[in-house]
Image (cartoon, rainbow, N blue to C red):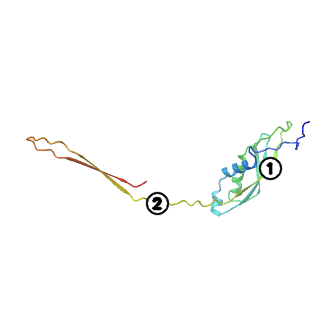
Amino acid sequence: MEKKPKHFLKQPEYPGGPKAMSKFIYENLRYPKQALEAGKEGVVLVEYDINHEGVVTDTRVLQSVGYGCDEEAERVIRLLKFEVGKNRGIKVVFHKKTQIQFKKPAAAVQPKPVAAPPMAITYQYVTATPSKPTVEAPKKEQVFSYSITYNGK
């Protein structure tokens, strides 16, 4: 005997479940520059519509933070794609709500690079021409000197 479905209509689900959806949102969320400069934090509550194909078609902010956070929350929600089961041939639009928390990113303290003292490496090449005892004046040795300075960069 076949078990009756729990719900008449199958709700859309994000692939991987709520944890995967949350991970996707926070990986794609960019803290707005305007909110960062103003030091604003808070929770944006977004209501959105999902069509029968699993695409987010409309978004509305129900709880606002402002300073660009609302627009960023809507942008990220529009990126979501859901899996929607067959609902008896009916094209249903689903309504869902999600809270997105905007928390100032921790100031990443980067260590200052330690400047290495400059090193001077000197190479000296000496080429000598063999002098033959001849009546002519002996040839002088040619000396070439090169210096290379390495700054450690």
| Residue 75 seen in this snapshot | no
For label 1, the SS is strand
First reached walking from the N terminus: tag 2 or tag 1: 1
Identify the residue at image location x=73%, y=50%.
19
Question: Which quadrant holds the N terminus?
Answer: top right
Q: Which residue is mark 1?
A: 96
Question: In this image, 104 relative to 127: left or right?
Answer: right
In the rendered structure, the answer to whether residue 61 lies left or right of residue 7 reads left
Kind of residue at disc 1: Lys
Q: Mark 2: which amino acid?
A: Val
Tell me: 129 left or right of 4: left
How dense is the environment of label 1, judged by Cα within 10 Å: few (below 14), some, or many (20 and up)?
few
- Look at the picture and state if 106 lies above or below 23: below
Residue 21, how many percent across, how many down? 73, 48
Q: Is residue 42 visible?
A: yes
> In front here: 124 or 13?
124
Question: Which residue is disc 2 drawn over?
Answer: 114
